């Protein structure tokens, strides 16, 4: 590893890195099994907001990934934590299947706006409702600000453009709780007992996965699957620690460095 680092933890993105919708990246399951034999802690970190953690875990297990619920840290979890800390009642602009992760949170007479990936809510009426709340002083919480994401057939707009539109219209700055927030990465690492200098992040999003991780002191490995597009590695400074074809290749590199 760069600078003779001692590697003790590996953070792994999910969508685009291990799978795209209901298709696993070729060889990813076997690569994860090999990584589990290494003396490192593994956590899975995701900005996915279109489904709750339980649904996400079911999807991964159907794809034969050996992953436990307590190994997954999501931006939905981070958003709920912030809502509870601030004691606000959010207008939840999240996918209906993600609402499970907000069970028990008061949403009547909202005084905050939470925006995730929710195409069914990106309409003029709902955006105007959020706009008016923000004008009245409600905080804007962005579960993340990804520009776009990958589905099997094409790239699709993420929540970032809609969050940015609300920021622009109301002269408000959103609090971003998911990747690339340093707080998100540090919270995901906390349960491993490792510091950022002892960790590496593997992901398909150069800015949010790799750039975010490297900004808080981790190494970042960019994989050319999922949303990756040619030249993405040139969009951040410093450049990714490593660029490789896929998650299995990233695991190969890590295991070689640990020998």
Image (cartoon, rainbow, N blue to C red):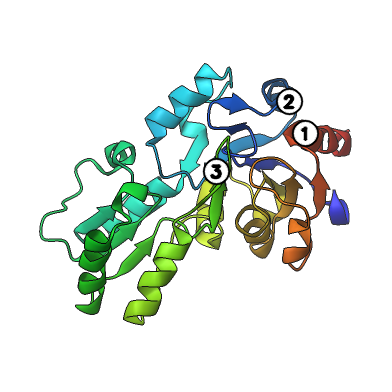
Dots 1 and 2: beta carbons under 8 Å?
yes
Residue 251 numbered tag: 1
Which residue is found at the position 37% from the left and 49% from the top?
Answer: 119
Direction bottom: furthest residue: 171
**Which is more N-terminal, label 2 or label 1?**
2
Dots 1 and 3: beta carbons under 8 Å?
no
Q: Name the residue under label 3.
A: 45
**Of residues 190 and 132, the one drawn nearer to the viewer in this rendering:** 132
Q: Can residue 86 be seen in this view?
A: no
**Which is more N-terminal, label 2 or label 3?**
2
The location of residue 130, given as percent across then percent down, is 25, 66
The location of residue 248, given as percent across then percent down, is 77, 31
As measured in the structure, the alpha-carbon distance from the residue carrying label 1 to the one carrying label 3 is 16 Å
Secondary structure at badge 2 equals helix
Left or right, 7 with respect to 98, comes to right
**Which is more N-terminal, label 3 or label 1?**
3
Residue 144's place in the image compared with 136, above or below, is above
Q: Within 10 Å of the Cα at label 2, are there few (<14), some (14-19), or many (20+) other Cα atoms?
A: some
Dots 3 and 2: beta carbons under 8 Å?
no
């Amino acid at each position: 590893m760069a600078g003779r680092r001692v590697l003790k933890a590996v953070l792994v993105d999910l969508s685009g890195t291990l799978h795209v919708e209901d298709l696993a990246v070729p060889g990813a399951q076997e690569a994860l099994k090999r990584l589990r034999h290494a003396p490192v802690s593994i956590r899975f970190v995701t900005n996915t907001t279109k489904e709750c953690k339980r649904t996400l875990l079911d999807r991964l297990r159907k794809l034969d990934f050996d992953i436990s619920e307590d190994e997954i840290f999501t931006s939905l979890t981070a958003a709920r934590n912030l809502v509870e800390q601030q004691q606000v009642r959010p207008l939840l602009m999240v996918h209906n299947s993600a609402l499970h992760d907000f069970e028990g949170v008061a949403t009547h007479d909202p005084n905050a706006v939470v925006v995730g990936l929710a195409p069914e809510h990106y309409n003029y009426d709902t955006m105007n409702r959020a706009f008016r709340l923000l004008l009245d002083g409600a905080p804007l919480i962005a579960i993340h600000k990804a520009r776009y994401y990958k589905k099997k057939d094409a790239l699709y707009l993420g929540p970032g453009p809609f969050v940015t539109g609300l920021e622009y219209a109301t002269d408000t700055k959103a609090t971003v709780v998911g990747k690339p927030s340093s707080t998100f990465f540090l919270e995901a690492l906390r349960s491993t007992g490792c510091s950022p200098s002892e960790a590496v992040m593997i992901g398909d999003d150069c800015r949010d996965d790799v750039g975010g991780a490297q900004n808080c002191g981790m190494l970042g490995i960019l994989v050319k699957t999922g949303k990756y597009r040619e030249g993405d590695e040139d969009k951040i400074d410093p450049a990714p620690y490593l660029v490789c074809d896929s998650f299995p290749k990233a695991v190969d590199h890590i295991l070689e460095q640990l020998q």
